[in-house]
Image (cartoon, helix red, strand yellow):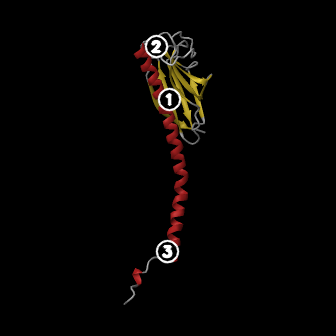
Amino acid sequence: MVKDKFNQGFTLVELMVTLAVAAIILAIAAPSFSQMIRDHRLITTANDFMGTMQLARSEAIRRGIQVTMLPITNGDWSSGWNVFTDWDADESLGDVGAVCAENQDCFLSQQNALDNVTSVTAGNTGSGFRFMPTGEILSTLGFPNGNITFCSTGSNERIITVNQSGSSRISIGNVCP
């Protein structure tokens, strides 16, 4: 039987060169992959916030009462947020029963503290958002637009702008520090 030189497999040198090239490619790709994960977490957080705002607005219209969206910790949106019906319009979640009864505050949604965002800043939002039965935002400050900016190191800001009618949009801002 004649040995065929080309059917003997890889040499050790060929295997080592292949592993070295693979290691270099992984070393270059890994940081980019980490940044991509941070970017998508920031996008997801901004989308969750906007979805919660849309829930609050639609519940206000559906139930015909004021629905309030406030940060869990006063003024700090990065601590998370609560959405609740606000029968007495006092911007606080009063006694909550197991069932959403007439004339009683009703807890609708909660987002816990954000661990994938470095900062959340609010502009022209007052203490939070109060959606009226018409879907509009009740504003005591007289501003045309409020905004919430989500930031994560190295990613582009995600800015949610809310106008007086209660509609909102997400835009991309500058690179976060």
Q: Amino acid at mark 2?
A: Met
Quadrant hosting residue 71? top right
Residue indicated by mark 1:
49
Residue 12 in the image: state x and y as whole percent: 52, 76
Question: Residue at coordinates 41% horizontally, 84% vertically from top-left?
Answer: 5
Q: Quadrant of the N terminus?
A: bottom left
Q: Amino acid at mark 1?
A: Phe
Question: Residue at coordinates 53% horizontally, 11% vertically from top-left?
Answer: 89
Nearest to the observer: residue 88 or residue 168: 88
Outermost residue to the left = 1
Quadrant hosting residue 151? top right
Question: Residue at coordinates 54% horizontally, 62% vertically from top-left?
Answer: 24
Q: Amino acid at mark 3?
A: Glu
At label 2, counting other C-alpha atoms closer than 10 Å, the crowd grade (few under 14, some 14-19, many 20 or more) is many
Residue 135 in sight: no
Residue indicated by mark 3:
14
Q: On residue 82, which mark appears?
A: none
118 up-or-down from 53: above or below: below
Q: On residue 132, which mark appears?
A: 2
